[in-house]
C-alpha cells in the first residue's frame, strides 16, 4: 500500500510557493483538482479490492507513488531554484502530517494484536510495527517474511505500511539529492559552465537515468523473486521517478488543449480498469505496472478546466470526501480487515463483513482526519520553524521506545509459557499417559484417558509453535549451490543392531525427533536425508515446483550414488515419505498422480538390492497449504480455546484434510515395499483434531510439530520393526 498524503500540500488549492509554468503562466497547482480526485479514486479502488476482491492488487498503490514523485518534485525544484528550501521546516511539514495519524493507527493495531492475533506472531508483529513507525517496513518484510517457512506478509496487520516506507524513504532522500545537485551546479556555473547549467534540465536527465536503471532492475528482480521485488524501494523508484519526470517536463511542455480532455479520460480508464484486468501482486512493479502508471500520468498531463475533461467529475462532493480522508482511510482499513479475519478464522470477507469493516474504517478515518490530522496541521505545522520536526522526532522516539519495551515484555511472557510447556514436552512418550498420540490410541480402543499433569496445558506453547522443529542442517538440503546431499544420524550412532535411511522432502524431517527416540529405544541407527520440495522419484517435479527441478534431479542423482556406495551395504530398510501435494510432471496420457506413482516405482528399482525393503510412510493430513492461513485460522482458534476443547473446536473434517497419497499404489508394484499408515493417530472416522492429548499437531498447517511427532514413536517403532525384523 502507499501513503496518500503528498509532501508539498494537503489542500486542493494552489500554494504561494508553487511555481508557474514558464510557457503558459498557469499556476503549478493547476493539476491539484485532478490529482486530488485521482487520489480519491485510487484509494477507493485499493480499499474496494482489499475488502470485496479478496485482497486483489488494483494498481492504486502505483498511482500513489506516481503522485508522490510528481508533487514532491514540482514543489522542491521551484523552491530550490529560488533558494527557499529549509530542510528542517520541509521535513517537519512532511513527516508530521504523515506520522501523526500513522502512529495512532499503529497504537490501535498493537491493541488489536493482543486481542485477536496468535501469540506466535506477537514478536514479529511488534517488530513490524516498529519498522512501520520508522519507514523501514518494506525491508523488514523482505528480510523477515519472505524466507522459507515464514508466515508471509499477508499475516501482518501492518503490511500496508510497506508503501509508506517506500515513500518515506523517498521523501527523506529526494530533498537532499535536489539540494546537493543545486549546490554542485552553482559551483560548476561559477567555475566552468558560466551559468549554463540549470537545475531542472540536469535533474531531468539524472532522474531519467535512475528511472531506466530502476525499471531494468524491477524486470530482473521480478523474474527471480516477485515477492521481494514487490516491496523493494529500488524496484519501485521508477514509478516515483515517472511522476518526477512528468513534473519536470510540464515546466516546459504541455499537450494541446484539444487533446487534454481525452488524455485525462483515457488515464482514468486505465486506472479504474487495471484491477479488473490483472492482479498486480503477480506482476508489479514489472512492465505491466505501466498500466496504472501511464493512467496516472495521462490524468496529470491532461489537466484542463475544459468541461469536456474529467475535472468536474473529480470534484464531486463524494469523491472529494474520500480524497480528503484517503490517507486515514488507507491506514485504518487494513488492520481492521486482518483483525476480523483472525477473529472469525475465515479465509476471506463476506460481503456483509467487508461492508462493516468499510463503515467502521470510514468513521475512524473521518474522526482521525478531524481530530488528529487537522489539529496537527493547525497547531504544529502552520506555526512554522522546527516545531513540527521536533514534535515528529519525539513522537517517533516514544513509539520506538514503547514498541521495544513491548517486545521485551512479550519475550518474557513467551519465555515463561515456553518453559512451562517444555517441562511437559520433555516427558517420555513411552511412559506418559494420554500425551499426544497416546490419547488418540486410547480413544480408538474405547479406553478413558486422563492425566492430571496435563490438565490445562498446551504443548508446545503457542508462542513457540514456529520453532517446534527437530530438523538439523545435516539432515536438510535447501538453497545451497551446488546441491549438497547429506544424511544425519539418529538413535544409536555406534553398536546398532539395525540401520535405516529416511529420505524425502520437509515432511521427512518433521518426525526426526520420533526417529531418534525409536533408534535409542531399539538400538537402531536411523539416518535422515531430505531436500526441500523434493523426494526420491525418477520423474521431474511438476509445475508447482518447476523452479526446483534441476536441484531436485541433482539431489536424486546424489542419493542413488550414496545408496550404491559400499559403506551403505548394511542398510536394513529405506523409509520414504513426502508431501502428497507434490506431484511430478506427467508424460503424454498420464495424470500427475500416475506420473508420481510411476516415478516412485522406477526410483525404488534403482536401489542396489531388492532385498532392502522400501517402507512408505503415508503423509500426514494437511490443514492448510499456506502458513499464513493456518496461523490466522487454526492457530488463532486454538488460542481462543482451552487445550481440552481446542482439538475438536479447531479441527477439520477428515475428508477435507486427507490428501490422496501415491505411495500405496507404488508399493503395490514393488514386491519388497510396504506401507505404514499412521492416519488413525491424526483422525477419527470423521474429524482430524488440531490438538490431540494436549499437544498441538501442526506447526504451520502441513508440517507436524516435533512434540507431536515424538508421541508417535511408540506406535511408529513397532510398525517399522514388523517389516525389518
Image (cartoon, helix red, strand yellow):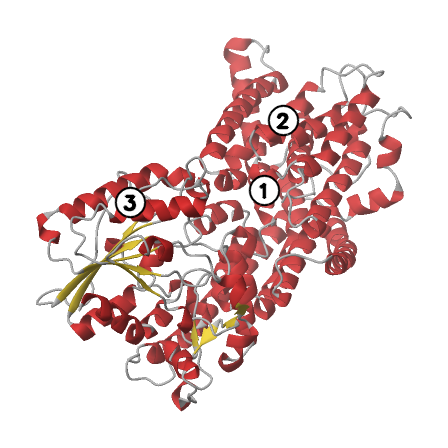
Residue sticking out furthest to the right: 307
- SS type, badge 3: helix
Q: Image quarter for residue 114?
A: bottom right
Horizontal side, residue 650 vs residue 330: left or right: left
For image coordinates 76% across by 16% down, the residue present is 254
Q: Position of residue 522 (x, y in %)?
A: 18, 73
Residue at mark 3 to residue at mark 2: CA–CA distance:
55 Å
Q: Are marks 1 and 2 in contact (CB under 8 Å)?
A: no
**Can I make out residue 603 in this image?**
yes
For image coordinates 47% across by 61% down, the residue present is 622
Q: Position of residue 12 (x, y in %)?
A: 81, 37
Vertical relation: 406 (above or below) 369: below
- SS type, badge 2: helix
Earlier sequence position, callout 3 versus callout 1:
1
Q: Disc 2 marks which residue?
A: 242
Q: Disc 3 marks which residue?
A: 602
For image coordinates 29% across by 76% down, the residue present is 714
Q: Which mark is residue 299?
A: none
Screen quadrant of the C terminus: bottom left
Q: Position of residue 428 (x, y in %)?
A: 28, 80
Horizontal side, residue 632 vs residue 441: left or right: right
- SS type, badge 1: helix
Screen quadrant of the N terminus: top right
Q: Image quarter for residue 110?
A: bottom right
Q: Position of residue 652 (x, y in %)?
A: 54, 68
Amino acid at each position: 500500500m502507499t501513503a496518500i498524503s503528498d509532501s508539498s500540500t494537503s489542500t486542493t488549492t494552489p500554494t504561494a510557493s508553487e511555481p508557474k509554468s514558464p510557457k503558459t503562466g498557469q499556476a503549478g497547482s493547476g493539476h491539484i483538482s485532478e490529482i486530488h480526485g485521482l487520489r480519491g479514486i485510487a484509494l477507493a479502488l485499493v480499499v474496494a479490492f482489499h475488502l470485496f476482491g479478496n485482497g486483489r492488487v488494483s494498481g492504486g498503490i502505483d498511482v500513489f507513488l506516481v503522485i508522490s514523485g510528481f508533487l514532491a518534485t514540482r514543489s522542491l525544484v521551484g523552491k530550490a531554484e529560488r533558494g527557499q528550501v529549509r530542510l528542517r521546516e520541509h521535513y517537519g511539514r512532511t513527516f508530521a502530517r504523515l506520522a501523526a495519524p500513522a502512529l495512532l493507527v499503529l497504537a490501535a493495531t498493537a491493541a488489536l494484536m493482543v486481542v485477536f492475533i496468535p501469540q506466535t506472531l506477537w514478536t514479529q508483529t511488534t517488530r513490524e510495527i516498529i519498522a512501520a513507525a520508522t519507514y523501514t517496513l518494506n525491508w523488514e518484510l523482505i528480510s523477515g517474511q519472505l524466507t522459507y517457512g515464514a508466515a508471509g506478509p499477508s499475516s501482518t496487520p501492518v503490511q500496508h505500511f510497506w508503501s509508506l516506507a517506500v515513500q518515506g524513504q523517498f521523501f527523506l532522500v529526494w530533498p537532499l539529492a535536489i539540494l546537493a545537485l543545486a549546490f554542485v551546479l552553482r559551483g560548476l556555473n561559477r567555475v566552468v559552465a558560466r551559468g549554463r547549467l540549470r537545475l531542472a534540465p540536469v535533474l531531468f536527465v539524472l532522474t531519467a537515468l535512475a528511472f531506466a536503471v530502476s525499471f531494468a532492475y524491477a524486470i530482473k528482480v521480478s523474474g527471480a523473486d516477485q515477492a521481494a521485488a514487490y516491496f523493494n524501494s529500488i524496484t519501485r523508484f521508477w514509478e516515483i521517478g515517472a511522476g518526477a519526470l512528468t513534473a519536470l517536463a510540464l515546466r516546459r511542455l504541455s499537450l494541446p488543449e484539444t487533446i487534454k480532455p481525452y488524455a485525462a479520460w483515457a488515464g482514468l480508464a486505465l486506472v479504474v480498469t487495471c484491477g479488473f484486468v490483472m492482479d498486480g501482486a503477480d506482476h508489479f512493479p514489472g512492465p505491466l505496472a505501466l498500466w496504472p502508471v501511464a493512467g496516472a500520468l495521462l490524468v496529470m498531463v491532461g489537466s484542463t478546466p475544459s468541461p469536456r475533461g474529467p475535472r468536474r467529475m473529480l470534484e464531486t462532493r463524494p469523491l472529494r470526501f474520500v480524497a480528503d480522508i484517503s490517507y486515514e482511510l488507507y491506514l485504518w482499513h487494513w488492520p481492521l480487515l486482518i483483525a476480523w479475519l483472525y477473529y472469525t478464522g475465515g479465509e476471506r470477507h463476506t460481503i456483509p463483513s467487508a461492508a462493516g469493516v468499510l463503515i467502521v474504517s470510514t468513521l475512524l478515518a473521518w474522526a482521525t482526519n478531524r481530530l488528529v490530522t487537522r489539529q496537527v496541521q493547525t497547531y504544529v505545522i502552520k506555526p512554522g520553524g522546527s516545531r513540527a520536526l521536533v514534535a515528529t522526532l519525539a513522537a517517533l522516539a516514544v513509539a520506538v521506545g514503547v514498541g521495544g519495551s513491548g517486545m521485551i515484555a512479550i519475550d518474557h511472557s513467551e519465555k515463561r509459557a515456553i518453559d512451562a510447556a517444555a517441562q511437559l514436552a520433555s516427558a517420555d512418550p513411552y511412559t506418559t499417559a494420554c500425551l499426544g498420540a497416546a490419547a488418540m490410541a486410547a480413544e480408538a480402543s474405547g479406553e478413558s484417558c486422563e492425566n492430571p499433569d496435563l490438565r490445562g496445558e498446551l504443548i508446545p506453547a503457542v508462542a513457540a509453535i514456529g520453532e517446534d522443529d527437530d530438523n538439523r542442517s545435516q539432515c536438510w538440503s535447501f538453497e545451497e549451490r551446488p546441491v549438497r546431499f547429506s544424511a544425519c544420524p539418529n538413535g544409536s550412532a555406534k553398536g546398532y543392531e539395525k540401520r535405516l535411511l529416511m529420505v524425502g522432502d520437509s515432511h521427512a524431517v518433521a518426525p526426526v525427533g520420533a526417529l531418534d527416540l525409536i533408534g535409542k529405544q531399539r538400538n537402531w541407527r536411523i539416518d535422515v536425508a531430505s531436500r526441500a520440495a523434493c523426494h526420491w522419484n525418477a520423474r521431474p517435479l511438476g509445475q508447482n515446483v518447476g523452479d526446483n527441478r534441476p536441484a531436485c534431479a541433482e539431489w536424486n542423482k546424489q542419493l542413488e550414488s550414496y545408496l550404491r556406495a559400499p559403506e551403505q551395504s548394511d542398510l536394513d530398510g529405506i523409509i520414504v515419505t513426502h508431501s502428497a501435494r507434490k506431484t511430478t510432471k506427467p508424460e503424454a496420457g498420464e495424470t500427475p498422480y500416475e506420473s508420481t506413482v510411476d516415478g516412485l516405482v522406477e526410483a525404488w528399482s534403482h536401489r542396489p538390492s531388492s532385498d532392502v525393503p522400501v517402507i512408505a510412510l503415508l503423509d500426514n493430513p494437511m490443514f492448510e497449504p499456506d502458513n499464513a492461513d493456518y496461523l490466522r485460522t487454526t492457530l488463532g482458534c486454538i488460542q481462543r480455546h482451552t487445550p481440552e476443547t481446542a482439538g475438536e473446536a479447531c479441527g477439520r473434517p477428515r475428508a477435507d484434510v486427507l490428501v490422496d497419497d501415491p505411495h500405496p499404489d507404488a508399493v503395490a508394484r514393488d514386491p519388497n515395499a510396504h506401507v505404514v499408515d499412521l492416519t488413525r493417530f491424526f483422525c477419527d472416522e470423521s474429524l482430524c483434531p488440531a490438538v490431540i492429548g494436549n499437544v498441538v499437531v501442526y506447526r504451520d498447517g502441513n508440517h507436524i510439530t516435533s512434540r507431536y511427532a515424538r508421541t508417535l514413536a511408540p506406535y511408529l517403532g513397532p510398525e517399522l520393526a514388523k517389516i525389518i525384523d
